[in-house]
Image: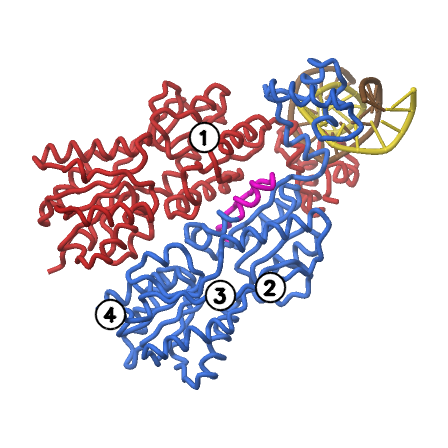
Chain colours: A red, B blue, C yellow, D brown
Amino acid sequence: MPITIREVAKRLNLSITTVSRALDGYDDVAKETQQQVIRTAREMGYTPNRAARQLRRKKADTIGIILPASAQRIAEPFFMEFIAGLGDELTLQGYDLLVANATTDENEKDLYQRWVGSNKVDGLILNRICLQDWRIQFLSERKVPFATLERSNDKAKYPSIQVDGEQSYLELLAHLVDNGFHHFAYIGGPAQLVSQRNRLNWIRKATKKLELEIDPALVVSADLTSMGGYRAAKEMLEFATPPDAILCIDDETAFGVLHAVHEKGLTIGSEIGIAGFDGTLESQHTEPPLTTLDIPVYDIARELVCMVLKLLAGHASNENIVKIIPELQVRGSTHHLV
Amino acid sequence: MPITIREVAKRLNLSITTVSRALDGYDDVAKETQQQVIRTAREMGYTPNRAARQLRRKKADTIGIILPASAQRIAEPFFMEFIAGLGDELTLQGYDLLVANATTDENEKDLYQRWVGSNKVDGLILNRICLQDWRIQFLSERKVPFATLERSNDKAKYPSIQVDGEQSYLELLAHLVDNGFHHFAYIGGPAQLVSQRNRLNWIRKATKKLELEIDPALVVSADLTSMGGYRAAKEMLEFATPPDAILCIDDETAFGVLHAVHEKGLTIGSEIGIAGFDGTLESQHTEPPLTTLDIPVYDIARELVCMVLKLLAGHASNENIVKIIPELQVRGSTHHLV
DNA sequence: CTGAAAGCGCTTACAG
DNA sequence: CTGAAAGCGCTTACAG
């Protein structure tokens, strides 16, 4: 039943061509006609049919994000802020956000294929990038615009935001040393993740620079969930020489670590230090509040949207790389208030 | 460049009519023809163009959710789990989820108008229902299928899930009393919210039944954010007779309360009790873990999806109301381990 | 400045 | 069992 352009045209005794052009603001329409068309369309409650417009323009006015199967749940704070940022910026720019949560790897491929093949989205946002990432190859081949958080090793050209944490980790480790911590552990994620490789590298560089040792037995991989962090911490706290500082690949992992350490009965901030990464909103409200390397997740998401939309508009270099430097947020989990 | 039905037809020397019907599984197509069509389509990587199909069928295969302007951020744990549930169930059923985050009330109305007017979505999911809710009237008038979490006072007919916490609050309060707490506070949300009215009612009923008093000065309204909970708690902890137990409208509010109480230096679980509502994943990992009235947010979301899809399929009573009884999760925030 | 017409890629009565 | 044709609601050369 929605009103169509034809009905608006009939009411005004105009052709649908003129109505269409008036609404789109073409300048070859008489000012007065345009005014009338716009007013009447509004009065009648006309909204252009999306499907028709899409079919004609071959554009969906929609950007998609497919959460990787490896993510347990969208429900993690990081994703929440990320999606909020995407949604806000897209809405602002008149686009829509299509979200899917892949359940299995197969299902994930399927989703990409369907969305791209059926023109459901004009572009995509990717995160949790892997060192070799089939998604990047798939989309590049098909020339579908996309932007990513972190870059893979693939040779393709695409805009992205890249986290540069070398200096930040140096600051974090120096801070920990200042507060009397020496015996470091790192709880990371799957080895194929770019962020895992980078963060571990930065930690190694920083420890070398500060002339610290890091026990290989204390460098472990969890799965970016608080449950994973909990289990990993549980285990290493029973070692003969347990760590006195635990660095985590992200805040979510750190939440689980906090829990495990509380259970162990250690005083966080003095007996043991814990640090996360991301600076999620939740990290402010843990007990004690979590020291973390803060990246502006919400703004990163918005920037990624801008990158893709620029690609769509055609006025953008394909190789736009924005660097983000994490900011050390010192909170109670790594230092002792005297 | 995507493959169209025409190209598949040409390759097989068939008409597009036959190809279309073969793919849709009509039974008036020769078995063998059908097999061939399906195989060839797959080989060629054919995916039906969504816009064309939508235009023809007048169906978008998409369900939408517009997060109310009142929600500060999608980034809250509740929304995350909710959206995860919606997304998972929809993907399973071959539908897509369209998400928008309204920024202002105006913008919110606008979004509803656009999505409905332009046929972008076949149905909607609503939450944060108000006692009088214009969204429900708007959608009912236009006969757009929707399902809600909580019911408004409007007379419209629509499927919904309703939380019934009367008994649960009685259990919670009895538990608190058993643990030596008497002086209750409630930090709620805006008065127009159905959940605010209900939860406060249940608390009043329970206190009456248990012959407890509740100081009117300790019944306050925050805004369903942890910051709001933090501020409200900060304030009431300075009262001449502060509460020794704080009930919160949701977990998010409780997170802020925990923070404020930690700052005050009180021992949570013995000196003061704190309880939330929702049973979000995060509530397990606070310090101490948060006692809460747990509702299965993820499953509720999936059920709401099923309700709307049934409405779309035409085989559903419009007045399907499912009741959910919150389950008391006793954790460290309200009791003292001896 | 305005309109008649083609066509985007499908689905679906209708005819054979 | 298969195909020719209409039409979903737009946009956009093209003609006037």
Q: Picture quarter containing residue A317?
A: top left
Q: In this view, does B12 lie to the left or right of B113?
A: right
Q: What element carries label 2?
A: loop
| Residue found at the far bottom of this picture | B211
Disc 4 vs disc 3: which is toward the camera? 3
Specify whether disc 3 shares its chain with disc 1. Answer: no
Q: Is residue B84 left or right of residue A297?
A: right
The verdict on residue B88 being magenta is yes
Specify whether disc 2 shares its chain with disc 3. Answer: yes
Specify whether disc 1 shares its chain with disc 2. Answer: no
Please say if the residues under marks 1 and 2 sit with CB atoms less than 8 Å apart: no
Q: Name the residue under label 2.
A: B151
Q: Which amino acid does label 2 sit on?
A: Arg
Q: Mark 2 lies on which chain?
A: B
The Cα atoms of the two marked residues, 2 and 3, are separated by 16 Å
Residue plotted at (22% across, 49% down):
A291
The Cα atoms of the two marked residues, 3 and 1, are separated by 43 Å
Q: Which chain carries label 3?
A: B
Q: Can residue B261 be seen in this view?
A: yes
Q: Picture quarter containing residue B149?
A: bottom right
Q: Residues within 10 Å of mark 2 (few under 14, many from 20)?
A: many
Q: Name the residue under label 4.
A: B267
Quadrant position of the C terminus of chain A in the picture: bottom left
Please say if the residues under marks 1 and 4 sit with CB atoms less than 8 Å apart: no
Residue plotted at (39% across, 34% down):
A127
Q: Which amino acid does label 1 sit on?
A: Val
Q: What element carries label 3?
A: loop
Q: Is residue A30 visible?
A: no
Q: Residues within 10 Å of mark 4 (few under 14, many from 20)?
A: some
Quadrant position of the N terminus of chain A in the picture: top right
Q: Name the residue under label 1.
A: A308
**Residue nearest the observer in this picture, B336 or B132:** B336
